[in-house]
Image (cartoon, rainbow, N blue to C red):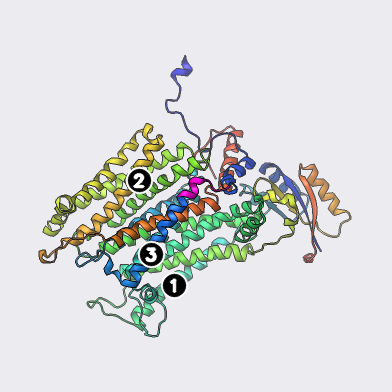
């Protein structure tokens, strides 16, 4: 009787489920790579590949004809190209948050999800970069517009512009994310080399593993390198979306000229990125048999991060509106009234619904543990975050100081084609990643399993943070 | 001809125990091969401190100073642009790019310094790979290697016996025909 009365009302869900050994983890984590691709994978891959084909077609059309084929105009000189750039870059930020910041904070639940989230970061950056490069109109000349390359004209870029900072921030971010991801991948590539049954795979994985043999001396330096890269990535990821927000905040335009932008953008980036991780992870763990290492606990914790960052985003909205009123500036106040009740009002209310109301359902544990509900909510949040960028960019530009220079923006089929195409490219890269590389870091999960076993053997309760 | 003696343990704890025992027995040229980093390895196998932080610091300093000087030279010396009479050279506007280049060069130096300098990669061949059982070193086996000190009689047989008594399986002797012993 007593035992029943004092029973823990909320049963704890483990981060690694079931009885695993190093050997069984090797089999379960790599099993998907050795099996023949299933019909579902092939069908999805074909679909994404055809969207990528459409992307390439639209890109060729834009480059050969000029960016006049987009809906951009004056006054709305920035539209889909910047909306989608900011949206994709923001999505990438969750990967770095999971892999770097949670590592520094010793949050052990990152171990099973960091590889997948980092891969998502890389592919999101690839998709993001397409937009500003195309927007330069003549990408082959962008080299000397964007980078300080010694050219025969003896001219240099202007480093006092936030757009220039953006070039350096995004290219550094992409590069460092790749190095971090690859460094974490090397021990697993060696494991793939050693456990593969086919000669071709042994050679290919062998080349990419660089000859890793898990030597104690190498591990000692590897651990330091991994930790230091995490330490570097942490301020880096904050700097990237801060600088992206400077692209707007430094301008005088009502709706852009706000000091809250840097933290508000970073919170929004993490918010949308975690939503994207959930969108990808829920089907991945289901179809790839990874439920023993990516448990409901992981999903639940990510939902909590979404609630926290969602509230920060909501605070950003409140402050924006408050300052529009408090500043006493007629134009500022008008911009916000125009967002809510002007011609683009549906986008505004969709954003408010998706970003403010939807995440509140994650206060309930029952919903956090319902995978279908979480998946639908994660997609709605990304729709909301896309609307937010549309709001910030298009509605601020389309009606500013002079009534005579007001205008409207409508995307053309090329705009929509390129945006949909980048989703196809993202899907293609992600599916290839799932096919050829382990979606869950085997070496880190094994290390965590050993720590748990050790803690249990020494009589400690299973730690979720775990001393290192 | 350099010789190694390899042995496989089934769990990290017995590997650490073996490392301590071998070091106590006077062996200095020891290494371990494991699928994941093991806490306490540095002590058990007598590894010194890592040089990665120093390399990272050099990279970061090069990036910060190089990045700042680059902007100063390009925008204030070589091609000054007067924008609305704002100062040609101004510290705050140069901070973001300086920071990004500091991070970029630090990351490159960590990555390159670790893999190409400290680990001496790419190294697709290593004599240990001759042993088929050594494949487990990256998935579930915990291997130790000893380079016996020359000069003693029957030293190899003694080390192999010691490894077996410590609980090692697959104890084997491998030879690198190309490399001369270091002493």
Q: Residue furthest top?
A: A1
- Which numbered disc flags the more N-terminal residue, 3 or 2? 3
Q: Vertically, is A121 above or below B73? A: above
Does the magenta stretch mainly form a helix, a strand or a loop? helix
> Looking at the rendering, which quadrant does residue B52 occupy?
bottom right
Q: Position of residue A96 (x, y in %)?
A: 44, 54
Q: Which mark is residue A400?
A: none
Q: Which mark is residue A379?
A: 2
Q: Position of residue A197 (x, y in %)?
A: 66, 50
Secondary structure of residue under mark 1 = helix
To the question of a shared chain for discs 2 and 1, the answer is: no
Q: Which mark is residue A57?
A: 3
Viewer-side residue, B160 vs A30: A30
Q: Tell which tag, 2 or 1, sits nearer the viewer.
A: 2
Asked whether the residues under the numbered discs 3 and 1 touch, taking CB atoms below 8 Å apart as contact, a structural biologist would say no
Q: Which residue is mark 1?
A: B65
The residue lying at 48 percent from left, 55 percent from top is A230
Name the subunit of mark 1.
B
- Residue stretch rendered in magenta on the structure: A36-43
Q: Tell which tag, 3 or 2, sits nearer the viewer.
A: 3
Q: CA distance from mark 2 to mark 1?
A: 44 Å
Q: Is residue A272 visible?
A: yes
Q: Position of residue A440 (x, y in %)?
A: 53, 47
Q: Position of residue A317 (x, y in %)?
A: 24, 49
Q: Quadrant of the C terminus of chain A?
A: top right
Q: Is residue A234 visible?
A: no
Viewer-side residue, A49 vs B61: A49
Q: Residues within 10 Å of mark 3 (few under 14, many from 20)?
A: some
The residue lying at 25 percent from left, 76 percent from top is B86
Residue B126 highlighted magenta (yes or no)? no
């Amino acid at each position: 009787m007593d035992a029943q009365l004092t029973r823990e009302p909320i049963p704890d869900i483990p981060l690694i489920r079931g009885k695993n050994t190093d050997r069984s983890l090797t089999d379960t984590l790599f099993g998907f790579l050795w099996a023949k691709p299933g019909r579902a994978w092939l069908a999805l891959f074909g679909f994404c590949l055809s969207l990528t084909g459409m992307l390439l077609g639209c890109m060729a059309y834009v480059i050969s004809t000029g960016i006049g084929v987009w809906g951009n105009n004056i006054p709305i000189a920035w539209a889909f190209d910047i909306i989608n750039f900011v949206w994709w870059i923001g999505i990438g930020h969750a990967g770095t948050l999971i892999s770097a910041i949670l590592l520094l904070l010793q949050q052990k639940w990152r171990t099973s999800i960091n590889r997948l989230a980092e891969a998502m970061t890389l592919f999101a950056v690839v998709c993001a970069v397409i937009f500003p490069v195309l927007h330069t109109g003549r990408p082959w000349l962008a080299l000397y517009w964007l980078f300080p390359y010694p050219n025969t004209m003896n001219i240099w870029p202007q480093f006092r512009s936030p757009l220039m900072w953006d070039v350096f921030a995004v290219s550094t971010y992409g590069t460092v994310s790749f190095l971090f991801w690859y460094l974490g991948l090397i021990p697993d590539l060696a494991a793939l080399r050693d456990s593969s049954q086919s000669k071709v795979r042994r050679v290919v994985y062998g080349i990419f593993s660089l000859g890793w043999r898990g030597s104690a001396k190498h591990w000692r330096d590897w651990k330091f390198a991994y930790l230091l890269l995490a330490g570097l990535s942490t301020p880096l990821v904050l700097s990237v979306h801060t600088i992206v927000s400077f692209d707007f905040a430094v301008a005088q335009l009502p709706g852009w000229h706000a000091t809250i932008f840097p933290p508000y953008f970073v919170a929004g980036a993490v918010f949308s990125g975690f939503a994207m991780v959930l969108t990808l992870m829920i089907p991945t763990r289901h179809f790839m048999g990874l439920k023993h290492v990516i448990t409901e606990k992981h999903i639940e914790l990510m939902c909590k991060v979404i609630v926290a960052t969602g509230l920060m985003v909501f605070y950003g909205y409140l402050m924006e509106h408050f300052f529009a009123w408090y500043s006493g500036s007629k134009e500022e106040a008008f911009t916000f009234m125009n967002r809510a009740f002007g011609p683009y009002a549906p986008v505004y209310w969709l954003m408010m619904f998706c970003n403010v109301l939807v995440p509140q359902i994650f206060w309930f544990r029952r919903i956090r543990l319902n995978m279908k509900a979480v998946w639908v909510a994660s997609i709605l949040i990304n729709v909301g975050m896309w609307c937010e960028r549309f709001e910030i960019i298009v509605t601020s530009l389309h009606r500013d100081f002079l009534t005579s220079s007001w205008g409207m923006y409508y995307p053309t089929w090329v705009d929509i084609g390129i945006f949909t195409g980048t989703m196809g490219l993202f899907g293609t890269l992600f599916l290839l990643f799932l096919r050829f590389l382990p979606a869950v870091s085997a070496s880190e999960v094994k290390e965590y399993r050993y720590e748990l076993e050790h803690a249990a053997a020494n009589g400690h309760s299973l730690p979720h943070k775990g001393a290192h | 001809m350099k010789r190694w003696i390899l042995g496989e343990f089934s769990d990290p704890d017995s590997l650490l125990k073996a490392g301590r025992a071998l070091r106590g027995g006077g062996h200095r040229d020891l290494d371990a091969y494991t699928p994941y980093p093991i806490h306490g390895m540095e002590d058990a196998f007598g590894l010194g401190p890592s040089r990665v932080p120093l390399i990272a610091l050099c990279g970061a300093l090069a990036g910060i100073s190089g990045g700042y000087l680059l902007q100063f030279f390009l925008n204030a010396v070589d091609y000054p642009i007067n924008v609305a009479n704002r100062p040609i050279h101004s510290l705050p506007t140069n901070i973001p790019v300086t920071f990004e280049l500091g991070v970029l060069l630090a990351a490159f130096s960590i990555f390159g310094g670790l893999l190409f300098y400290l680990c001496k990669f790419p190294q697709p061949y290593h004599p240990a790979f001759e042993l088929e059982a050594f494949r487990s070193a990256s998935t579930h086996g915990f291997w130790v290697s000893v380079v016996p000190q020359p000069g003693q009689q029957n030293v190899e047989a003694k080390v192999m016996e010691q490894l077996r008594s410590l609980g090692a399986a697959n104890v084997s002797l491998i030879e690198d025909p190309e490399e001369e012993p270091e002493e």
